[in-house]
Structures are given as C-alpha cells and as structure tokens.
Image: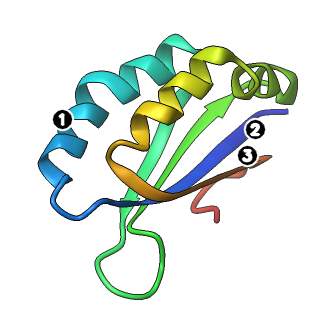
Amino acid sequence: MTVKLIMTWDILPGREQDYFEFVVREYIPAMQQLGLEPSDAWFTMYGNQPQIMSTAQMSTLEAMDNVLKSADWDSLTRRLMDYVDNFEYKVVESRPGFQI
C-alpha cells in the first residue's frame, strides 16, 4: 500500500527568500535521499489555512515509519524550523488527486 506524507507549515515573516533557497537546494534533495518521493506542493493565497502544504510518497507504511523515526528526518525537520512555524504532518493511504 503506497502511503503519503502530508506536511503543512507557515513561512516565517522575513525568511521567504532564505526558505525557498533552502527548500530547493537542501530540503527536497534530502527528502529524496531518505527515499521519500515528493509529489505535490501548494501555496495558500487566501484563507485561514497553512501557507504551505507539501506531500511525499513511499511504497509502504513500514518504510515511511522508518524514515520518520530516523535521526536524518529529525535533523532535516529541525533545519526546516529555521524558516517555518506551525509545522505539522500526517501519514495517510495514498489516493489519486488532492488529499488533506
């Protein structure tokens, strides 16, 4: 069963440029090295929702659990916290289309 990691966060005010550089140069490549397959990213333009929603997939729940329990994942999310606030994530069974 393919599973999807759904993550949400808000970019810290004044850190937008640094955030985008970090995501492109470090965050996405590091996720891929962990075996996560980035699949979607959305930016909220209007409304009271998290500013960013991003997803990544893995082939099994066991593989996803191993990644989320790893020191590398912990280190990566701690680095992300330099640029974001209100970080949350959940793992769901992957379905086609938009999932929240």
Contact between labelled residues 3 and 1, with CB atoms less than 8 Å apart: no
Dividing the picture into quadrants, the one containing residue 73 is: top right
Quadrant showing the N terminus: top right
Contact between labelled residues 2 and 3, with CB atoms less than 8 Å apart: yes
Q: CA distance from mark 3 to mark 2?
A: 5 Å
Percent across and percent down for residue 25 are: 24, 24
Q: Residue at x 49, y 39 (%)?
A: 39
Residue 61 visible in the displayed image: yes
Q: Which numbered tag is attached to residue 21?
A: 1
Residue bearing the label numbered 2: 3
**Mark 2 vs mark 1: in front:** 1
Q: Secondary structure at mark 1?
A: helix
Q: Is residue 73 above or below residue 2?
A: above
Q: Which numbered tag is attached to residue 94?
A: 3
Ranked by sequence position, the earlier of labels 2 and 1 is 2
Q: Residue at x 38, y 28 (%)?
A: 27
Dividing the picture into quadrants, the one containing residue 69 is: top right
Q: Is residue 90 left or right of residue 52?
A: right
Q: Secondary structure at mark 2?
A: strand
Q: Could you classify mark 1 by the number of other residues whose Cα lies within 10 Å: few (under 14), some (14-19), or many (20 or more)?
A: few
Q: CA distance from mark 2 to mark 1?
A: 27 Å
Q: Residue at x 57, y 15 (%)?
A: 34
**Mark 1 vs mark 3: in front:** 1
Residue type of the residue flagged with mark 1:
Glu
Contact between labelled residues 1 and 2, with CB atoms less than 8 Å apart: no
Residue 36 visible in the displayed image: no
Q: Secondary structure at mark 3?
A: loop
